Image: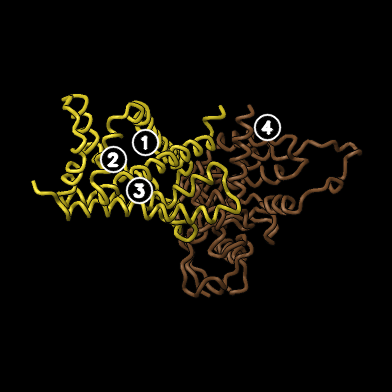
Chain colours: A yellow, B brown
Amino acid sequence: MGFISTSIARKVAMALSGLFLVFFLGQHFVINISSVIDPDTFNSWSHFMGTNGLVQFLLQPVLIFGVIFHFIMGFILEYQNRKARAINYKSFKGNNNSSWASRNMLISGVVILAFLGLHFYDFWVPEIVHKYIESHPEDPSRYFPELVHKFESPVRVGLYALAFILLIFHLWHGFSSSFQSVGFNNKYSRALKGFTRLYAVLIPLGFVFIALYHHFNQLPH
Amino acid sequence: MKLTLKIWRQKNATAKGSIQTYPIDGIDGDMSFLEMLDVLNTQLINKGEEPVVFDHDCREGICGTCSLQINGEPHGPDRLITTCQLHMRKFNDGDTIVIEPFRAKAFPVIKDLMVDRSSFDRIQQAGGYISVNTSGNTIDANAIPIEKDDADASFNAAACIGCGACVAACKNASAMLFTAAKVSQFALLPQGRVEASRRVLNMVEQMDKEGFGNCTNTGACEVECPKGISLENIARMNREYLSAGLKG
């Protein structure tokens, strides 16, 4: 068995792809929150992200690969872990020794995956169609109204909020756990755990706030 | 004390097992959990029934032989003890106690509550040792100065008795805490550094071959470990593994 196909290599790969996605989430949040503070800034940053060649043709494929890799690896690990205990316990008190979030990363992950499907359908696919298929001329001021319009539907806002609540659970365990996976467990770990848990709660709640803000501050049609 | 025991009974390694119910009376709070099972077995033998098979040896918490998943937790509800150190005073009159074997594909049931944990032996054999000359001119280990923190951390890792509670507690049946303890106890000492890379690569490879699950850092192993082996050991093993793998 090669070095990269062992259980430790797999968990390190999971951790590194997770950390990359956490970093991306933070960057995404910074852009999105600008839509609440100043629509012009949001338009200008979105225009940059949507038209910059490096972002579009290098970072975007890397991000898509990161997302797909993280999910596929998660399913592979879950399959192997279920195989490792062929007969389940009649009585298993997981809550006595571990958190719900840590034991149910698959559940939170699947909800986030479903959300990503909706998110791609809502934003990414129309964007690709707009730019590369229908080849509309670029309008740097179109991003803000498009964003606000997406949050008009209460159902979409509800689904958005649900997914981000599950993301809190996913990050609550996953973010700090990724440091343990890459071997970082020392006197700074306690402080780092505090930061990761703060991030795990504040960033998803921030996204929910943005959705609610635009839902209640719709632009005239 | 009057109790209802729900015990996993399985004739042999290939038979299909099931939970059987046994009412038991006259249990004293000062009895150990294994003594309570001894009482049950005496009653079963007197009735001409097959006694319940379970692992035990030293009965003082140091050999790592006793196991048992008791009411959903390895070694029962108490912390930092083995099943043989669990007293019946932890339970109440009228309680129902579910007793199952440690469950993992790599810990197959031999009979009833007895499991085969030789997979741990094979992990240990894959590298859990140091090669020293034992022909008479061995250097005294105490002749090599070792920093106190490292000596303490190594000693704490060496406290692992290999009972398998970490595997039993883990939702993934992962053996990372056991393997990490065995890697760490040597990795922290100069005597163990010589074979450190080979050791961690071989032990992890053997751990995977045995069919244990992947660690997802739930921390259940650390909580349930009767010897308090810390998750720091898993982080250390991950570092050792990455460094050994990158060195090639």
Question: Where does label 3 land, which residue?
Answer: A108
Question: Where does label 4 land, which residue?
Answer: B198
Q: Quadrant of the N terminus of chain A?
A: top right
- Mark 2 or mark 1: whose residue is earlier in sequence: 1
| Residue type pointed to by label 2 | Leu
In the image, A137 versus B102, the foreground residue is A137
Residue B110, x across and y down, in percent = 56, 46
Chain letter of the residue carrying label 1: A
CA gap, disc 1 and disc 4 = 34 Å
In the image, B14 versus B73, the foreground residue is B73
| Badge nearest the viewer, 1 or 4 | 1
Left or right of residue A41: residue A70: right
Chain letter of the residue carrying label 3: A
| Badge nearest the viewer, 4 or 2 | 2
Secondary element under disc 1, as helix, strand or loop, is helix
Secondary element under disc 3, as helix, strand or loop, is helix
Chain letter of the residue carrying label 4: B
Secondary element under disc 4, as helix, strand or loop, is helix
Q: Is residue B190 among what the camera can see?
A: yes
Secondary element under disc 2, as helix, strand or loop, is helix
Q: Quadrant of residue A80?
A: top left
CA gap, disc 1 and disc 3 = 15 Å
Q: Are the numbered discs 1 and 3 placed on the same chain, yes or no?
A: yes
Question: Where does label 1 land, which residue?
Answer: A67
CA gap, disc 4 and disc 2 = 42 Å
Residue B38, x across and y down, in percent = 61, 63
Question: Where does label 2 land, which residue?
Answer: A116
